Image: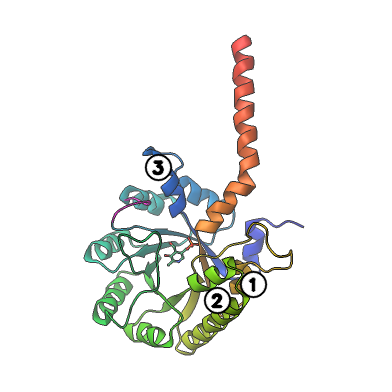
Amino acid sequence: MTFSGLHLTALDAPLLGVNIDHVATVRNARGGRFPDPVAAALLAVEGGADIITFHLREDRRHIRDDDVLRLKESVHVPLNFEAAVTDEMLDIIERTAPEHVCLVPERRQEVTTEGGLDVIGQFDRVRDACVRLGEAGSRVSLFIGADPAQIDAAARAGAPCVELHTGPLAHAWWDRDHAALERELQRLQRGLLHATSLGLRTHAGHGLALSQPEADGADQPSSAALVAALPDVHELHIGHALIGHAIFVGLKQAICDFKAEAIRARQAGRA
Ligand code: PXP
Protein backbone atom coordinates (compact mmCIF):
# COMPACT_ATOMS: atom_id res chain seq x y z
CA MET A 1 0.00 0.00 0.00
CA THR A 2 1.26 3.47 -0.74
CA PHE A 3 0.49 6.64 1.21
CA SER A 4 0.76 10.19 0.06
CA GLY A 5 2.71 12.49 2.39
CA LEU A 6 -0.56 14.13 3.39
CA HIS A 7 -1.99 10.82 4.62
CA LEU A 8 1.14 10.28 6.69
CA THR A 9 0.74 13.66 8.32
CA ALA A 10 -2.62 12.54 9.68
CA LEU A 11 -1.08 9.63 11.58
CA ASP A 12 0.50 9.96 15.01
CA ALA A 13 3.99 10.57 13.71
CA PRO A 14 6.56 13.28 14.33
CA LEU A 15 6.15 16.35 12.16
CA LEU A 16 8.55 16.38 9.23
CA GLY A 17 10.70 19.43 8.61
CA VAL A 18 12.14 19.24 5.10
CA ASN A 19 15.45 21.00 4.65
CA ILE A 20 15.78 22.41 1.13
CA ASP A 21 19.39 23.67 1.34
CA HIS A 22 20.64 20.98 -1.02
CA VAL A 23 18.37 22.14 -3.81
CA ALA A 24 20.08 25.52 -3.52
CA THR A 25 23.47 23.80 -3.56
CA VAL A 26 22.65 22.22 -6.93
CA ARG A 27 21.36 25.56 -8.25
CA ASN A 28 24.46 27.40 -7.09
CA ALA A 29 26.73 24.87 -8.80
CA ARG A 30 25.80 26.62 -12.08
CA GLY A 31 25.07 30.05 -10.68
CA GLY A 32 21.64 30.36 -12.31
CA ARG A 33 18.08 30.09 -11.02
CA PHE A 34 17.44 26.35 -11.51
CA PRO A 35 16.57 24.27 -9.54
CA ASP A 36 14.78 26.82 -7.41
CA PRO A 37 14.68 25.91 -3.68
CA VAL A 38 11.44 27.86 -3.28
CA ALA A 39 9.74 25.76 -5.99
CA ALA A 40 11.11 22.68 -4.20
CA ALA A 41 9.67 23.95 -0.91
CA LEU A 42 6.22 24.31 -2.48
CA LEU A 43 6.45 20.80 -3.90
CA ALA A 44 7.60 19.52 -0.51
CA VAL A 45 4.51 21.06 1.09
CA GLU A 46 2.32 19.40 -1.58
CA GLY A 47 4.05 16.12 -0.66
CA GLY A 48 3.17 16.58 3.02
CA ALA A 49 6.12 18.47 4.53
CA ASP A 50 4.91 19.97 7.79
CA ILE A 51 7.72 22.50 8.08
CA ILE A 52 10.21 23.95 5.61
CA THR A 53 13.70 24.24 7.02
CA PHE A 54 16.61 26.23 5.58
CA HIS A 55 19.99 27.37 6.85
CA LEU A 56 21.20 30.81 5.85
CA ARG A 57 24.93 30.43 6.34
CA GLU A 58 27.35 33.28 6.82
CA ASP A 59 29.04 32.42 3.48
CA ARG A 60 25.66 31.99 1.67
CA ARG A 61 26.92 28.74 0.16
CA HIS A 62 23.40 27.44 -0.49
CA ILE A 63 20.37 29.49 0.64
CA ARG A 64 20.67 33.19 -0.21
CA ASP A 65 18.95 36.24 1.21
CA ASP A 66 16.48 36.55 -1.64
CA ASP A 67 15.49 32.87 -1.17
CA VAL A 68 14.55 33.70 2.41
CA LEU A 69 12.32 36.55 1.26
CA ARG A 70 10.67 34.41 -1.40
CA LEU A 71 10.14 31.53 1.03
CA LYS A 72 8.48 33.90 3.46
CA GLU A 73 6.17 35.19 0.71
CA SER A 74 5.13 31.88 -0.79
CA VAL A 75 5.32 29.05 1.76
CA HIS A 76 2.25 28.58 3.95
CA VAL A 77 3.53 26.01 6.42
CA PRO A 78 5.83 27.11 9.26
CA LEU A 79 9.34 28.12 8.21
CA ASN A 80 12.21 26.90 10.36
CA PHE A 81 15.10 29.33 9.94
CA GLU A 82 18.42 27.75 10.95
CA ALA A 83 21.17 30.20 11.73
CA ALA A 84 24.28 30.86 13.76
CA VAL A 85 24.04 33.12 16.80
CA THR A 86 25.51 36.22 15.15
CA ASP A 87 24.26 39.80 15.14
CA GLU A 88 23.81 39.68 11.36
CA MET A 89 21.64 36.55 11.52
CA LEU A 90 19.59 37.76 14.49
CA ASP A 91 18.80 40.97 12.55
CA ILE A 92 17.74 39.01 9.46
CA ILE A 93 15.60 36.62 11.53
CA GLU A 94 13.88 39.53 13.27
CA ARG A 95 13.08 41.12 9.91
CA THR A 96 11.87 37.81 8.44
CA ALA A 97 9.83 36.74 11.49
CA PRO A 98 9.79 32.99 10.72
CA GLU A 99 7.51 30.85 12.85
CA HIS A 100 10.47 28.78 14.06
CA VAL A 101 14.18 29.38 14.51
CA CYS A 102 16.85 26.81 15.16
CA LEU A 103 20.13 28.21 16.46
CA VAL A 104 23.10 26.16 15.30
CA PRO A 105 26.88 26.33 15.56
CA GLU A 106 28.64 27.34 12.36
CA ARG A 107 32.23 27.08 11.23
CA ARG A 108 33.20 28.35 7.80
CA GLN A 109 35.33 25.31 6.89
CA GLU A 110 32.77 22.65 7.84
CA VAL A 111 30.92 20.70 5.15
CA THR A 112 27.75 20.58 7.27
CA THR A 113 26.79 21.46 10.85
CA GLU A 114 29.25 19.46 12.92
CA GLY A 115 28.42 18.96 16.58
CA GLY A 116 25.85 20.82 18.56
CA LEU A 117 25.72 24.36 19.84
CA ASP A 118 27.85 24.95 22.94
CA VAL A 119 25.15 26.63 25.02
CA ILE A 120 27.23 26.44 28.21
CA GLY A 121 30.26 28.04 26.59
CA GLN A 122 28.36 31.05 25.22
CA PHE A 123 25.49 31.12 27.64
CA ASP A 124 24.82 34.86 27.79
CA ARG A 125 24.84 35.24 24.01
CA VAL A 126 22.45 32.29 23.53
CA ARG A 127 20.13 33.39 26.34
CA ASP A 128 19.96 36.94 24.90
CA ALA A 129 19.20 35.51 21.45
CA CYS A 130 16.40 33.34 22.87
CA VAL A 131 14.86 36.37 24.58
CA ARG A 132 15.21 38.61 21.50
CA LEU A 133 13.81 36.06 19.02
CA GLY A 134 11.05 35.00 21.41
CA GLU A 135 9.98 38.64 21.71
CA ALA A 136 10.00 38.88 17.91
CA GLY A 137 7.45 36.05 17.85
CA SER A 138 9.60 33.11 16.73
CA ARG A 139 9.67 29.79 18.54
CA VAL A 140 13.32 29.07 19.30
CA SER A 141 15.01 25.71 19.26
CA LEU A 142 18.66 25.04 20.12
CA PHE A 143 20.52 22.37 18.14
CA ILE A 144 22.58 20.52 20.74
CA GLY A 145 24.08 17.12 21.43
CA ALA A 146 22.17 14.72 23.69
CA ASP A 147 24.25 15.92 26.63
CA PRO A 148 22.44 16.52 29.95
CA ALA A 149 24.56 19.57 30.81
CA GLN A 150 23.82 21.25 27.44
CA ILE A 151 20.13 20.37 27.80
CA ASP A 152 20.07 21.96 31.26
CA ALA A 153 21.74 25.07 29.84
CA ALA A 154 19.20 25.23 26.99
CA ALA A 155 16.37 25.20 29.52
CA ARG A 156 18.07 27.91 31.61
CA ALA A 157 18.58 30.00 28.47
CA GLY A 158 14.82 30.04 28.03
CA ALA A 159 14.58 28.08 24.77
CA PRO A 160 11.20 26.34 24.49
CA CYS A 161 12.64 23.57 22.27
CA VAL A 162 15.79 21.61 21.65
CA GLU A 163 16.75 19.68 18.54
CA LEU A 164 19.02 16.82 19.51
CA HIS A 165 21.84 16.09 17.07
CA THR A 166 21.44 12.63 15.55
CA GLY A 167 24.72 12.82 13.58
CA PRO A 168 26.61 10.29 15.75
CA LEU A 169 23.67 7.86 15.55
CA ALA A 170 23.47 8.35 11.78
CA HIS A 171 27.20 7.67 11.39
CA ALA A 172 26.92 4.44 13.41
CA TRP A 173 23.99 3.40 11.22
CA TRP A 174 25.86 4.09 7.97
CA ASP A 175 28.88 2.17 9.35
CA ARG A 176 26.59 -0.69 10.42
CA ASP A 177 28.29 -0.54 13.78
CA HIS A 178 25.52 -2.13 15.82
CA ALA A 179 27.14 -1.57 19.22
CA ALA A 180 27.70 2.14 18.53
CA LEU A 181 24.20 2.45 17.09
CA GLU A 182 22.66 0.96 20.24
CA ARG A 183 24.80 3.25 22.41
CA GLU A 184 23.79 6.34 20.44
CA LEU A 185 20.13 5.35 20.43
CA GLN A 186 20.17 5.00 24.22
CA ARG A 187 22.04 8.31 24.62
CA LEU A 188 19.46 10.01 22.42
CA GLN A 189 16.58 8.45 24.38
CA ARG A 190 18.08 9.61 27.70
CA GLY A 191 18.55 13.10 26.25
CA LEU A 192 14.96 13.23 25.03
CA LEU A 193 13.63 12.09 28.41
CA HIS A 194 15.79 14.59 30.25
CA ALA A 195 14.72 17.48 28.00
CA THR A 196 11.07 16.47 28.27
CA SER A 197 11.34 16.35 32.07
CA LEU A 198 12.51 19.99 31.96
CA GLY A 199 9.44 20.97 29.93
CA LEU A 200 11.30 21.33 26.63
CA ARG A 201 9.71 20.32 23.33
CA THR A 202 12.04 17.85 21.67
CA HIS A 203 13.09 17.53 18.04
CA ALA A 204 15.77 15.44 16.35
CA GLY A 205 17.76 15.64 13.17
CA HIS A 206 20.95 15.37 11.17
CA GLY A 207 22.16 12.63 8.87
CA LEU A 208 18.94 10.59 9.03
CA ALA A 209 18.28 8.37 6.03
CA LEU A 210 15.77 5.93 4.62
CA SER A 211 17.95 3.21 3.18
CA GLN A 212 21.50 2.50 2.24
CA PRO A 213 22.84 0.60 -0.75
CA GLU A 214 23.46 -3.11 -0.16
CA ALA A 215 21.82 -3.06 3.28
CA ASP A 216 22.34 -6.20 5.37
CA GLY A 217 18.75 -7.23 5.06
CA ALA A 218 15.30 -5.91 4.29
CA ASP A 219 14.44 -5.92 8.01
CA GLN A 220 17.22 -3.46 8.82
CA PRO A 221 15.38 -0.40 10.16
CA SER A 222 16.34 2.93 8.64
CA SER A 223 17.99 5.55 10.83
CA ALA A 224 14.93 7.75 10.20
CA ALA A 225 12.69 4.94 11.51
CA LEU A 226 14.83 4.33 14.59
CA VAL A 227 14.53 7.97 15.61
CA ALA A 228 10.92 8.49 14.50
CA ALA A 229 9.88 5.55 16.70
CA LEU A 230 10.98 7.38 19.86
CA PRO A 231 7.79 8.81 21.39
CA ASP A 232 9.44 12.02 22.64
CA VAL A 233 10.46 13.11 19.14
CA HIS A 234 7.90 15.73 18.07
CA GLU A 235 9.69 16.88 14.93
CA LEU A 236 12.24 15.33 12.61
CA HIS A 237 14.41 17.59 10.47
CA ILE A 238 15.84 15.91 7.39
CA GLY A 239 17.64 17.31 4.36
CA HIS A 240 20.52 15.60 2.62
CA ALA A 241 19.22 12.02 2.48
CA LEU A 242 15.70 13.18 1.62
CA ILE A 243 16.90 15.23 -1.36
CA GLY A 244 19.23 12.33 -2.25
CA HIS A 245 16.31 9.91 -2.14
CA ALA A 246 14.36 12.24 -4.43
CA ILE A 247 17.03 11.66 -7.07
CA PHE A 248 16.40 7.93 -6.99
CA VAL A 249 12.62 8.08 -6.92
CA GLY A 250 12.51 10.86 -9.51
CA LEU A 251 15.34 10.00 -11.91
CA LYS A 252 13.36 7.61 -14.14
CA GLN A 253 10.62 10.20 -14.61
CA ALA A 254 13.19 12.89 -15.40
CA ILE A 255 14.73 10.72 -18.12
CA CYS A 256 11.28 10.00 -19.59
CA ASP A 257 10.51 13.73 -19.64
CA PHE A 258 13.77 14.63 -21.41
CA LYS A 259 13.40 11.80 -23.96
CA ALA A 260 9.80 12.75 -24.63
CA GLU A 261 10.88 16.35 -25.12
CA ALA A 262 13.52 15.30 -27.65
CA ILE A 263 11.04 13.07 -29.53
CA ARG A 264 8.44 15.84 -29.64
CA ALA A 265 11.03 18.31 -30.90
CA ARG A 266 12.08 15.96 -33.75
CA GLN A 267 8.47 15.32 -34.69
CA ALA A 268 7.69 19.03 -34.68
CA GLY A 269 10.81 19.66 -36.78
CA ARG A 270 9.65 17.17 -39.44
CA ALA A 271 6.07 18.46 -39.57
N1 PXP B 1 18.92 19.85 11.77
C1 PXP B 1 19.87 20.81 11.79
C2 PXP B 1 19.88 21.76 12.93
C3 PXP B 1 20.80 20.94 10.75
O1 PXP B 1 21.74 21.89 10.79
C4 PXP B 1 20.70 20.06 9.65
C5 PXP B 1 21.65 20.20 8.50
O2 PXP B 1 21.44 21.41 7.86
C6 PXP B 1 19.69 19.10 9.66
C7 PXP B 1 18.82 18.99 10.75
C8 PXP B 1 19.48 18.14 8.54
O3 PXP B 1 20.60 17.32 8.39
P1 PXP B 1 20.69 16.41 7.09
O4 PXP B 1 20.82 17.34 5.92
O5 PXP B 1 21.92 15.61 7.34
O6 PXP B 1 19.45 15.59 7.03
**In this figure, which colouring scheme has been used for the structure?**
rainbow
238 above or below 180? above
Question: Which of the two discs, 1 and 2, sits closer to the camera?
Answer: 2
Q: Nearer the viewer, residue 88 or 165?
A: 165
- Assess whether mark 3 and mark 2 are in contact (beta carbons under 8 angstroms): no
Question: Quick check: marks 1 and 2 in contact, CB under 8 Å?
Answer: no
Residue at 47 percent across and 85 percent down: it is 195
Q: Earlier in the sequence, mark 2 or mark 3?
A: 3
Q: Position of residue 166 (x, y in %)?
A: 50, 72
Q: Earlier in the sequence, mark 1 or mark 2?
A: 1
Q: Give percent across and percent down for residue 242.
A: 55, 56
Q: Is residue 61 magenta?
A: yes
Q: Residue at x 63, y 21 (%)?
A: 264
Q: On screen, 150 above or below 55?
A: below
Q: Which residue is mark 1?
A: 12
Report the Cα–Cα distance between label 2 and label 3. 34 Å
Q: Main secondary structure of the magenta part?
A: loop
Residue at screen point 24% across, 81% down: 124
Tell me: residue 122, above or below residue 213: below
What mark, if any, has residue 233 been given in the picture? 2
Quadrant of the image for the C terminus? top right
Q: Residue furthest right?
A: 1
| Residue range of the region highlighted in magenta in the rendering | 59-64
Which residue type carries mark 3? Ala
Answer with left or right where residue 223 lies relative to residue 159.
right
